[in-house]
Image (tube, rainbow, N blue to C red):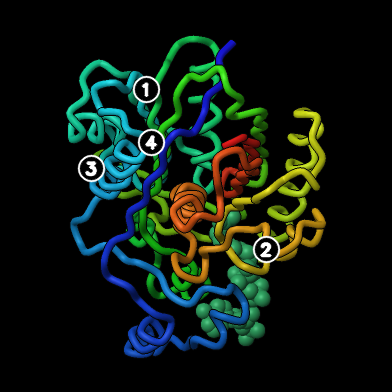
Amino acid sequence: MPYAKIIGSGGYLPPRVVSNDELAADLATRQIETSDAWITERTGIRQRHIADPGVTSSQLAVKAAQQALEDAGISAEELDLIIVATSTPDFIFPSTACLVQAQLGNKGAAAFDVQAVCSGFVYALTTADSFIRAGRARHALVIGAEVFSSILDWNDRGTCVLFGDGAGAVVLSASEEPGILEAELNADGSLANILHVAGSVVDGQVTGDPFLRMDGQAVFKQAVTALAASAQSVCDKAGVSLEDIDWMVPHQANVRIINFLGRKLKLSDDKVIVTVDQHANTSAASVPLALDAARRDGRIRQGDLVLMQGVGGGFTWGSVLARM
Ligand code: ACO
């Protein structure tokens, strides 16, 4: 049975950078009080990239995908599977993956979206791994892409300061060499109300609430508990110990969650990739963006053992353990 090996990665962030100070000044014009000090201390976030009006997830995804394909040294025509993880698709349908496929110039690959919010990338990666291991695909493109700014209530300081836009991508290929060693996905739908966008379009009208709502403290508690258990479980299944992990690439929601998790798993800080300070929380894009940043700056290298973890709305969570 072949392994699915990550052979390339890419990332794209929209050019407009909004610092905490700029965001605080903008919110102040609407009598909403926040500050760089509050945001930095509670979240570790210093800035976020925000897409211009009209920019879509598929546009960000294509740019990240092109970089990942170039890095992998394969052409778009060679792909036989394209999965996009997103909670901010361009349309109800066609899927963002089909839009990306057309823009990349591929015809014929299976293409579909995965909706698991901030866990979307690890869900999509696990799905692609399963296709490759089963012999149903040879070259897969897995993308996390979000224009999360479009579902934020910019009058709610408790949420709008936390997120940003962007896309990250990896190319997976069937390989005899070890690649993804183990993966585990979980969900608990009974916790849907701690983080949700409970709106829809019915008969041409928005029904419900189209903006993200969150019980921040409940999310914090669930995230650290679920991710610590998931990390241990995926390592046990793969027959490796947490100490063997070279790099942890956690979902980038909040530096306090990341630090808490690192301490719980007894991983030293210098093994944990952190981009939340620069990107804020880009939901499904956060893990592939962080992975790509660390591959490009030379920290994550061929042969390293990498634990990727996602957690988010649903409530969903999951881990992927990969030999690079
Ligand atoms: N600026 C200034 N004050 C603020 C802001 C803000 N942006 N947001 C909230 N406050 C205020 C609140 O109104 C409250 O004021 P009060 O005491 O007068 O009522 C005070 O700060 C404390 O609010 P809490 O919500 O209790 O703050 P907390 O310490 O829990 O921090 C946070 C909030 C950062 C959201 C925290 O709960 C957290 O990190 N939760 C994890 C959630 C997360 O990271 N979500 C990301 C999406 S989910 C995911 O990706 C998994």
Residue picked out by circle 3: 204
Q: Amino acid at mark 4?
A: Val
Q: Nearer the viewer, mark 3 or mark 4?
A: 4
Residue 122 visible in image: yes
Give the Cα separation between the discs numbered 2 and 1.
34 Å
What crowding class fits label 1: few (fewer than 14 Cα within 10 Å), some (14-19), or many (20 or more)?
Answer: many
Judged left or right of residue 32, residue 277 is right
Q: Amino acid at mark 2?
A: Asp
Does any atom of ligand 1 lie closer than 8 Å to the CB of label 2? no
Residue 84, by quadrant, is top left
Q: Amino acid at mark 3?
A: Gly
Q: Nearer the viewer, mark 3 or mark 2?
A: 2
Residue 100, by quadrant, is top left
What crowding class fits label 2: few (fewer than 14 Cα within 10 Å), some (14-19), or many (20 or more)?
Answer: few
Q: Position of residue 269 (x, y in %)?
A: 70, 64
Residue picked out by circle 2: 270
Task: Classify the position of the C terminus by image quarter.
Answer: top right
Judged left or right of residue 131, residue 9 is left
Residue 197 visible in image: no
Q: Label 4's element?
A: strand
Residue picked out by circle 1: 81
Residue picked out by circle 4: 84
Q: Label 1's element?
A: strand
Q: Amino acid at mark 1?
A: Leu
Give the Cα separation between the discs numbered 3 and 1.
32 Å
Q: Label 2's element?
A: helix
Q: Earlier in the sequence, mark 4 or mark 2?
A: 4
